[in-house]
Amino acid sequence: DVQLQASGGGLVQAGGSLRLSCVASGFTFDDRAIGWFRQAPGKEREGVSCITGSGTNTYYTTSVKGRFTASRDNAKDTVYLQMNALKREDSAVYYCAKSQFGTGCPAPFYVDKWYDNWGQGTLVTVSS
């Protein structure tokens, strides 16, 4: 059974940091790129980042470039999203999902239909 579980969300003040984790099981982890998405209340799901299976390449949406960093530990079947300099507009439920296209990230990476096995999200709330 393929599963991805995001965790690490919480309440943080603007300018603070959080690190999200996404633990996977049920598939060969390093064979798949992993995407991070978020969805704020009343808004569509938005692609935040994607990291390739090897972890060599990462992609970010413009609004988080320079603040968020995706990484992975394939020995632990885990992907991380380090979020620094958080802003109120980063508040959302964050999800991880497995790319349907193997080790590479889809092009463009932010198209959610190209991912599957969406995990249960983790809520990030940034207060001013």
Image (cartoon, rainbow, N blue to C red):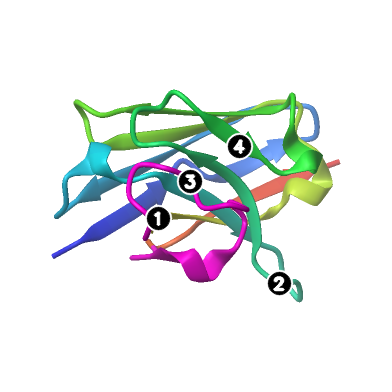
Q: Which residues are magenta?
A: 99-118
Query: What is the x, y in percent for residue 121?
Result: 47, 59
Quadrant of the rendering where the N terminus is positioned: bottom left
Q: CB atoms at circles 3 and 4 under 8 Å apart?
A: yes
Give whichever of 3, 59 is nearer the camera. Answer: 59
Task: Give me the C-alpha separation between circle 4 and circle 1.
Answer: 13 Å
Q: Give how far across and how far down residue 114 sits, in percent.
A: 47, 65
Residue visible at 29% across and 44% down in the picture:
23
Tag shown at residue 59:
4
Type of amino acid under label 3: Cys
Q: Quadrant of residue 42?
A: bottom right
User: In 3D space, how far apart are the residues under numbered discs 3 and 4 (Cα atoms)?
Assistant: 8 Å
Q: Amino acid at mark 4?
A: Tyr
Residue 105 has which mark?
3
Among numbered discs 3 and 4, the one appearing first in the sequence: 4
Of callouts 4 and 1, the N-terminal one: 4
Residue 94 figure quarter: bottom right
Name the mark nearer the viewer: 2 or 3. 3
In the rendered structure, which disc, 1 or 2, sits on the residue that comes first in sequence?
Answer: 2
In space, the residues marked 1 and 2 are separated at their CA atoms by 19 Å
Label disc, if present, on residue 38 of the rendered structure: none
